[in-house]
Amino acid sequence: MSILEVRNITYYYQDGRNKRVILDNLDAEFEKGKFYAILGESGSGKTTFLSLISALDSPKEGIILYEGKDIKEIGYERYRRNCIGIVFQNYNLIQYMTAVENVLVAMGITENKIEGNKKETAYKLLEELGIDKETADRRVNRLSGGEQQRTAIARALSTNVDIIMADEPTGNLDHETSEGIIELFMKLAHERNKCIIMVTHDLAIADKSDVILKLDTKKKQFEVINNRLEFIVE
Ligand SMILES: Nc1ncnc2c1ncn2[C@@H]1O[C@H](COP(=O)(O)OP(=O)(O)OP(=O)(O)O)[C@@H](O)[C@H]1O
Ligand SMILES: [Mg+2]
């Protein structure tokens, strides 16, 4: 069964009298244990889609179901706190706090059960993502981009959610660091049964995913890319 289901979503921006439709009757399904890449031209609506499934905005029509339940019923704030983790291109960490403090903030907000001592768990999680204790105790404005993004991923995971959504998470990172982050997402999907939904412009990254969804600018719906070889070469 899919953990997240998007049914018949329509979204538009109202520019004065003009209605600019971005998503039109779009359907999608996401399962645990899979790594999804969302592709599409700039302006096709990828970030808009992510803002809807992360309940930062609501669709004009259609519904989004988490474990079969309308996220509106769950409550948007509650859904964000307890069901999903979000990773942004610019990390969105609290700059004057240390890495471990950033993770602890998220753990303090969620209503999900966290086993054991929170601080120990936070250090352990960071360690698993390649941030040692010395680094974890540094203020995030003194960390490299890759370290900040790992911290952001640790924060997203710290609340024991099953879905991680990321909007171009490697957009500000060099090639090697990006590869490390992508490996990490793959492992989270395949070894820890998370559902990873990632927007990217990078075809090589998308090629490592389990499912590629391309947002078609004309149809304003997803096209599932099956013939990968042809697509990537193109
Ligand atoms: N608040 C807004 N008001 C009006 N139009 C908007 C608003 N936010 C985004 N748009 C428009 O909606 C369309 C989709 O934007 P979106 O940010 O979702 O695209 P995207 O696929 O994420 O693009 P990119 O790859 O450049 O990040 C764009 O044409 C954008 O200009
Ligand atoms: Mg975008």
Image: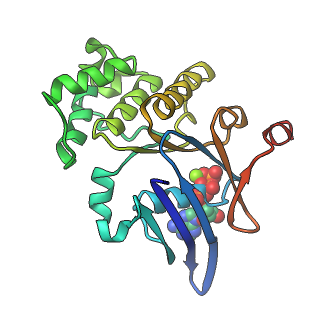
The furthest residue to the bottom = 17
Residue 20's x, y, as percent?
A: 63, 76
Residue 226's x, y, as percent?
A: 76, 46
Horizontally, residue 186 falls left or right of residue 223, namely left
The furthest residue to the front = 1
Depth check: give the residue in front, 116 or 142. 116
Horizontally, residue 123 falls left or right of residue 165, namely left
Horizontally, residue 111 falls left or right of residue 226, namely left
Instruction: Identify the residue shown where x is 78% and y is 40%.
Output: 228
Residue 84's x, y, as percent?
A: 37, 49
Quadrant into which the C terminus falls: top right
Query: Is any part of residue 47 visible from this angle?
Result: no
Instruction: Identify the residue shown where x is 51% and y is 56%.
Output: 50
Instruction: Identify the residue shown where x is 51% and y is 75%.
Output: 62
Query: Is any part of residue 228 visible from this angle?
Result: yes
Relative vertical location of residue 75 with respect to residue 40 in this rendering, above or below = below
Q: Quadrant of ligand 1?
A: bottom right
Relative vertical location of residue 122 with respect to residue 26 in this rendering, above or below = above
Depth check: give the residue in front, 94 or 107. 107
Relative vertical location of residue 128 with respect to residue 117 in this rendering, above or below = above
